[in-house]
């Protein structure tokens, strides 16, 4: 059946988990614009996703009608913070709130650093910055909020020590100093309070929770910037005692706090790979991070030259809190779906539709763990989907218009994202304080990952491949990057043939290694895209919906951060180019990323290597020298982003079959990452395996042309059939005619 | 902190993007207006690079309208949380017309800026 796409979005959703096996439950979470009173939900199989004229259409197969549901609008609460508990005795008697703070943005509203309870809505106290970054201490006393204020604003991007304290007599003191300066500030008028009354038992760092129970997601007044050693101490500390806690050796902290049974001090240099803030006070009341405060970032103790938090964790004792970070929309489940035992592996979606609009919520069905139901495996490039999810650079940066040589077109998804900044950004974007986004989450709608998306790359283009395989009658198993990361070469090794998607740019180092082991061990890989096997990401073990992507080689923030904060917090490896951590795609696929150019696409021109007997099977039935001067993505097969081997000796085991030429000025002006930016079609025989590399994101856009009868479909089919044939493949003879170096 | 543009991270630096419009190059204007979505000459491509990357004027985008086959040329949001601002007369029935409007809008504003005396 063929569906029509909506004009504008009235509802969006996400699912959890993204990939499931037969028997597993998936929950779907939907929020509607006000006015959408009801919607219907059904589960469909996605067979193609391009409704543009000349395209394969939006082709789906019904799986199950789920039912009709009331349209509900759900809020999103962005902003990172730590939530923990403390003794209700902490703020009885005398107490202190203290922290090191490095603010990075003026937000025009209160920014809370350390809060016990919520003094504005109930009992408690808070150390915070006002609208102009002036420190302040708020205490609930006698039914009102007493405020002690500092007269000077903190400087942006400079470390300061802050101490707010209250004595049994109700004397409030607020002291502040830049780390290289003297303490300033003094007492405020005493407040009336009952020093024996127990206080709240909830502590929040970097925000203020709406109530003492503090439901995750319901925090506000977020701080934007870095905090180190935030603490609440059951004593009215003087400044020298505060200095010991804030700037002394981390090894001394347990001893300094040993007698303070109510004290809480979070040493953020401990457990950087987790979402737990470790309390080194005697109670061990650890806190939990929400909305992904950035870890593995330099604190006040960082030294020039430090690069890896694993070697000097004490120098990385800060968390960077962001008021606009979002990890989990936490919308209630609207409906669920249990994957039937006999449902074929593949691309699926929940289609929700009501008056005025609809949405497709994609998910994937994998075969049962340990099983293979087809000889062909397609690895859906979900790490790339996650990396680009909710991209805003498209209209926030001039690069996209330049690289596509036409105005950026904002479709329904982009217009929705602009109207809903709370859905967060992609790892190509920056937070509002200019820090590059490092963590992305599946627990929010990913509006780039939609069929018919105006961008015409990624998910929609991978469906070109799904569509072609389906029309070929070739069943495929589908898994995601995360699955290959976890199950490695054992998973891949169950399949004679493995296909990538059209843009497998991002993967973990373990996943890259799995592909390498698969091919060396005799596997046959069809690399069906471009800009693949290029950059490292980390799948979080503790929260599997989070992926870390430090694109450090393209970060917009300063050189300092690029040099010293390049290592993932979640696995410790360097983010960015995989080749920087010893994983060269050219040794696996014969090519590496060359350039991008979304203005138009080019054909391949056959090279002498295409006539090598080892490649004869590739070109069976193809007589043309020019391959693919057509296609849905720019009118050719070398386009969007593509690869070559320039600068490398790819070795005699790789044949150069074809190359592109006569490019426009766009690749060298805006896309090329190396001086030679032609595309290369290759066939390689590394180890005991074989790799066919189309090396371009546009290749699959040609498969459906001329009613699926064209040279590109023929070549792709030839390779697939031959790779499925268990007969040994014969590598080229050494010195095969390969003209291009 | 003022983030860099992603343009600072790509390209081979083989070509130099001009920093001014040559008002006399009406030939490039006519080339563009005749076929906005076609393959352009190198000189026109470089001029377009200047028009599109100029930071002294707002960025432009084209919005898909509710009515199929209609678009709106608009100023992109200047900051997150703001909405696009459609240009007066920016409603068009083709993407080629959207390009023509954007080209002429940028050309005229940048020429005006060039004509202003330096502060």
Image (cartoon, coloured by chain):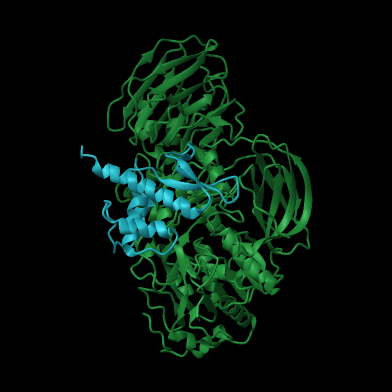
Residue B95: tell me if it is visible. yes
x and y, in percent, of residue A359 in the image: 66, 48
**Relative horizontal placement of residue A96, taking residue A479 as reference (left or right):** left
- Say which of A83 and A105 sits in front: A105
Chain B visual colour: cyan
Does A419 sit above or below residue A576? above
x and y, in percent, of residue A345 in the image: 70, 64
Residue at x 72%, y 70% (from the top left corner): A373
- Say which of B109 and A249 sits in front: B109
Does A591 sit above or below residue A393? below
Q: Please identify the residue farthest to the left as the structure is shown.
A: B118
Chain A visual colour: green
Q: Can you say which quadrant of the picture contains the N terminus of chain B?
A: top left
- Say which of A407 and B2 sits in front: A407
x and y, in percent, of residue A82 in the image: 52, 35
User: How many numbered tags mark residues here?
Assistant: 0
Q: Can you say which quadrant of the picture contains the C terminus of chain B?
A: top left
Q: Which image quadrant for residue A405?
A: bottom left
Residue at x 39%, y 33% (from the top left corner): A101
Residue at x 74%, y 48% (from the top left corner): A41
Residue A557: tell me if it is visible. no
- Say which of A125 and A337 sits in front: A337
């Amino acid at each position: 059946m063929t569906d029509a796409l909506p004009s504008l979005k009235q509802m969006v959703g996400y699912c959890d988990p993204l990939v499931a096996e037969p028997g597993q439950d998936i929950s779907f979470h939907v929020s509607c614009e006000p006015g959408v009173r009801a919607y219907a939900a059904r589960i469909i199989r996605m067979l193609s996703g391009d409704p543009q004229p000349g395209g394969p259409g939006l082709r789906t197969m019904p799986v199950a009608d789920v039912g009709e549901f009331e349209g509900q609008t759900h809020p999103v609460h962005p902003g990172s913070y730590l939530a923990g508990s403390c003794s209700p005795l902490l703020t009885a008697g005398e107490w202190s709130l203290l922290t090191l703070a490095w603010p990075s943005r003026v937000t025009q509203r209160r920014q809370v650093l350390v809060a016990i309870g919520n003094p504005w809505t109930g009992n408690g106290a808070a150390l915070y910055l006002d609208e102009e970054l002036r420190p302040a201490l708020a205490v609930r006393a006698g039914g009102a909020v007493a405020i002690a204020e500092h007269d000077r604003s903190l400087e942006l991007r400079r470390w300061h020590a802050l101490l707010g304290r209250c004595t049994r007599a109700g004397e409030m003191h607020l002291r502040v100093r830049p780390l290289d300066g003297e303490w300033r500030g003094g007492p405020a008028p005493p407040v009336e309070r009952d020093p024996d009354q127990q206080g709240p038992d909830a502590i929040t760092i970097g925000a203020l929770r709406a109530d003492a129970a503090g439901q995750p997601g319901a925090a506000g007044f977020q701080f934007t910037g870095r905090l180190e050693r935030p603490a609440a101490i059951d004593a009215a500390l003087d400044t020298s005692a505060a200095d010991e806690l804030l700037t002394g050796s981390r090894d001394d902290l347990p001893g300094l706090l040993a007698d303070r049974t109510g004290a809480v001090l979070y040493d953020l240099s401990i457990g950087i790979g987790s979402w737990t803030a470790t309390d080194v006070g005697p109670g061990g009341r650890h806190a939990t991070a929400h909305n992904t405060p950035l870890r593995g970032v330099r604190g006040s103790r960082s030294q020039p030259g430090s690069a890896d938090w694993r070697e000097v964790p004490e120098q990385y004792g800060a968390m960077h809190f962001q008021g606009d970070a979002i990890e989990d929309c936490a919308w209630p489940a609207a409906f669920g779906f249990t994957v039937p035992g006999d449902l074929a592996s593949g691309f699926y979606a929940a289609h929700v539709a009501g008056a005025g609009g609809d949405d497709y919520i994609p998910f994937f069905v994998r075969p049962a763990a340990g099983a293979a139901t087809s000889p062909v495996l397609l690895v859906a490039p979900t790490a790339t989907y996650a990396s680009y999810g909710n991209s805003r650079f498209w209209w926030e940066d001039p690069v996209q218009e330049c690289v596509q040589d036409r105005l950026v077109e904002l479709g329904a998804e982009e217009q929705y994202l602009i109207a809903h900044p709370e859905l967060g950004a992609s790892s190509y974007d920056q937070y509002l304080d200019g820090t590059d986004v490092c963590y992305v989450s599946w627990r929010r709608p990913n509006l780039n990952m939609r069929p018919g998306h105006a961008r015409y790359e990624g998910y929609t283009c991978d469906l070109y491949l799904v569509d072609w395989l389906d029309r070929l009658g070739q069943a495929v198993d589908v898994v995601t990057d995360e699955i290959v990361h976890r199950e490695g070469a054992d998973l891949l090794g169950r399949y004679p043939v493995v296909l990538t998607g059209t843009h497998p740019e991002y993967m973990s180092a373990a996943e890259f290694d799995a592909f390498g082991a698969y091919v060396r061990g005799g596997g046959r890989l069809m690399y069906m895209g471009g800009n693949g096997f290029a950059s490292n990401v980390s799948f979080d073990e503790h929260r599997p919906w989070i992926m870390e992507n430090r694109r450090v080689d393209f970060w917009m923030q300063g050189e300092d951060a690029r040099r010293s904060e390049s290592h993932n917090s979640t696995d410790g490896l360097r983010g960015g180019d995989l080749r920087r951590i010893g994983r060269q795609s050219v040794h696996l696929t014969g090519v590496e990323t060359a350039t991008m150019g979304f203005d138009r696409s080019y054909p391949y021109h056959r090279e002498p290597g295409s006539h090598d007997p080892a490649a004869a099977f590739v070109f069976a039935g193809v007589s043309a020298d020019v391959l693919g001067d057509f296609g849905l993505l720019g009118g050719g097969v070398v386009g969007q982003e593509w690869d070559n081997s320039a600068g490398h000796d790819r070795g005699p085991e790789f044949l150069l079959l074809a190359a592109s030429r006569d490019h426009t000025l766009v690749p060298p002006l805006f896309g090329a990452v190396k001086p030679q930016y032609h595309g290369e079609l290759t066939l390689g025989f590394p180890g005991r395996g074989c790799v066919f590399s189309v090396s371009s994101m546009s290749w699959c856009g040609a498969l459906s042309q001329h009613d699926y009868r064209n040279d590109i479909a023929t070549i792709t089919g030839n390779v697939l059939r031959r790779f499925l044939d268990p007969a040994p493949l014969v590598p080229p003879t050494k010195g095969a005619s390969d003209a291009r170096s | 902190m003022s983030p860099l543009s992603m343009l600072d991270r790509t390209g081979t630096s083989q070509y130099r993007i001009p920093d001014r419009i040559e008002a006399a190059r009406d030939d490039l204007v006519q080339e563009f207006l005749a076929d906005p979505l076609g393959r352009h000459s190198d000189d026109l491509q470089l001029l377009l690079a200047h028009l599109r990357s100029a930071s002294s004027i707002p960025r432009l985008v084209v919005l898909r309208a509710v009515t199929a086959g209609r678009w709106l040329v608009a100023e992109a949001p200047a900051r997150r949380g703001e909405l696009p601002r459609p240009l007066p007369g920016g409603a068009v029935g083709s993407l080629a017309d959207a390009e023509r409007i954007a080209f002429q809008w940028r050309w005229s504003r940048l020429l005006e800026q060039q004509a202003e005396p330096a502060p």
